[in-house]
Image (cartoon, coloured by chain):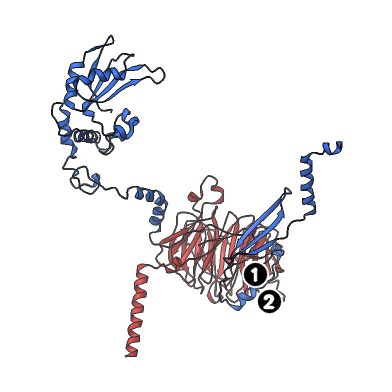
Amino acid sequence: MRPILLAGHERALTQIKYNPDGDLIFSTAKDQQICVWFAHNGERLGTYHGHQGAIWTVDVDPTSTIIASGSADNTIRLWDIKTGKCLKTWDFPTAVKRVEFNEDGTKLLGVTEKRMGHLGTIVVLDIKVDVEAEQSDEKALTIVCDESKATVAGWSYCSKYIIAGHEDGSVSQYDAKTGDLLMNFPIHELNMAITDLQWSQDRTYFITASKDKTAKLITAKDLEVLKTYVSDTSLNSATITPKKDFVILGGGQAAMDVTRTSARQGKFEARFYHKIFEDEIGRVRGHFGPLNTVAADPTGKGYASGGEDGYVRVHQFDKGYFDFMYEVERERQNRLAAQQQQQQQQITA
Amino acid sequence: MAAVAKHDWADDEDLDETTTTTTQDLPPPQKIQNKDGSTTIIEYRINDNGQKVKTTRRIRLITHREVVNPRVAERKTWGKFGQSAKDVAGPAPDTTSVGENIIFKPSVNWRKDAKDESKDPNAQAMKDKLKDKKVKCRICNGEHFTARCPYKDTMAPIGDAAADAAAGTDDDTPGGGGGGAAATEGAGAAGAGKKGSYVPPALRGGAGGAGAREGDRMGGSKYGERDDLATLRVTNVSEMAEESELRDMFERFGRVTRVFLAKDRDTGLAKGFAFISFADRNDAVKACNKMDGFGFKHLILRVEFAKKAQ
């Protein structure tokens, strides 16, 4: 496969998001603009200007009408995807590290940083998915994380829970209506921050990436760890691929440690693991710095990764990727095919 | 007339250039349809140094049809905005480029595969080299490496016994060449006798064993099959000696195949030692006995059998 290199940012990437149709890619970096790209050819559709600080996060609503972004200038902004116009700005006392729309796009959560005497919080905002509509200023809900600040958060299926990953390596489940803490488990190693949390397509389980060099697949309902993927480097991002049962992990040595290491030693590769068997099945190299974010195309055709080097690399998978199967998987497929044939023969007879 | 003489051709050139850059009368971009269906686009522009740059691009358009969701199709018609507002349709070269091809094939034992791949160029070259070479065991002559021989621990290499026999000077080994080969084999085996000890390249294996001496290296393949057993080393040779004189002296005992007199490269004077090879080992033995202690140009010659270079 030939990756498409997108050089729209001057500084390290912070997050990449595909829209649900998989045709647009949104990228944010520590410079002050959001870029939107066409996924099929890497053409830049536009940039969104207005933030005054590093942009940490972006998310797109399910209808691909608006995007929300969170920045170090202590704001969450809402943008019209088509025109690049800023629709709404919410001010917060500290930087916003993560935003995410719920499944129907009616709510937006934002994770704010713990700083300057303010505790880390998770705020929920009501959103009207309409470019013309007036957005409300009021926060629908504020969850204060007094134990350890939340680094990442997301909405579970049916917007039932808010799941948050914390700096101390624990994962919490909050009731999305009341904001009550329902569960908190030390999933990752103590004081190893959770760096990413991405959902499966149906939002019943999610994957977390952590500085403790592991990624874990966890159920949303009772925070049960289903799978653990062990790597040899601290991880910054993890995503679940649709269509094929893989997960992609991205990481690498921290930016401050990389000066004397070659690309190979730095482990700046996207790592593919089999989602069920937990085996590493391949790596994709290319970045000159740690991978800060990886995102899988919702159509399952490719993935994009963003690195500390300021590049986004968009990959379209080859045939070999789709053909890959474990021996047991292949046997099962053959058996099912044989059974079907038998049934058909019986029907015709 | 004087004014014309003053006018320098170099200035002329300069003037010309400035006019082109200022007026910017660049040729219009050209589009040429090639016969093979591709299009050549030639564009002209002026770079930062004021030089004219011609860009030739050859483009082949391949129509790739894909049915997409109407929402996706609609988005493709959107106008660009922000920093891309001025970009024309299609990916802009300053933000979008295509990376080098990456081979990514998921595999359960990808780690091993990757290693094989990295070794590949060397391994391939080695394979080509050894394509028509046959593996032969030095112990049992079987078609496997000596190290893999099943008799490795129980049998000595074939050459060993023969070499022992050849070491006794009086014992005639049938066929000079064969004896020589056996001797080299023996040396090789002796060198490799201690397990794990260093064996110089010249003594490794039987194949290259013939090239074991300094002179051989220089002589190349010409002396490759030399019979070391019938070679005498002559020392205490006068500086004034000539190869022809030595040859005359030693030819009395039998056919001499080679005379080598070491000479200083700069002065051309003999260094004081020489090697004489005989066709027959018996002649060499005779010559050794007779010539040792022979007076030659005021010096007493010392003649002995040449030892293998260690």
Query: Viewer-proximal residue, B149 or B19?
Result: B19
Q: Which of the 4 image quarters holds residue A13?
A: bottom right
Residues packed near mark 1 inside 10 Å, few (<14), some (14 to 19) or many (20 plus): many
Give the mark nearer the N terminus: 2 vs 1: 1
In this view, A128 is above or below B30: below
Which residue is under mark 2? A130
Which residue is under mark 1? A67
Residue A14 placement (x, y as % from top left): 60, 59
Q: Which of the 4 image quarters holds residue A64?
A: bottom right
What range of the chain is rendered magenta? Answer: B92-101
* In magenta stretch: residue B97: yes
Indicate the amino acid at tag 2: Asp
Q: Which of the 4 image quarters holds residue A82?
A: bottom right
* Quadrant showing the C terminus of chain A: bottom left
> Which chain does the red colour mark?
A
Q: Chain of mark 2?
A: A
Q: Residue furthest left?
A: B171
Residue B208 placement (x, y as % from top left): 29, 37
Query: Viewer-proximal residue, B21 or B244?
Result: B244
Residue B159 placement (x, y as % from top left): 19, 37
Q: Residue furthest front?
A: B1
At numbered mark 1, what does the secondary structure look like: helix, strand or loop? strand
Q: Residue at x 13, y 29 (%)?
A: B171
Residue B62 placement (x, y as % from top left): 57, 69
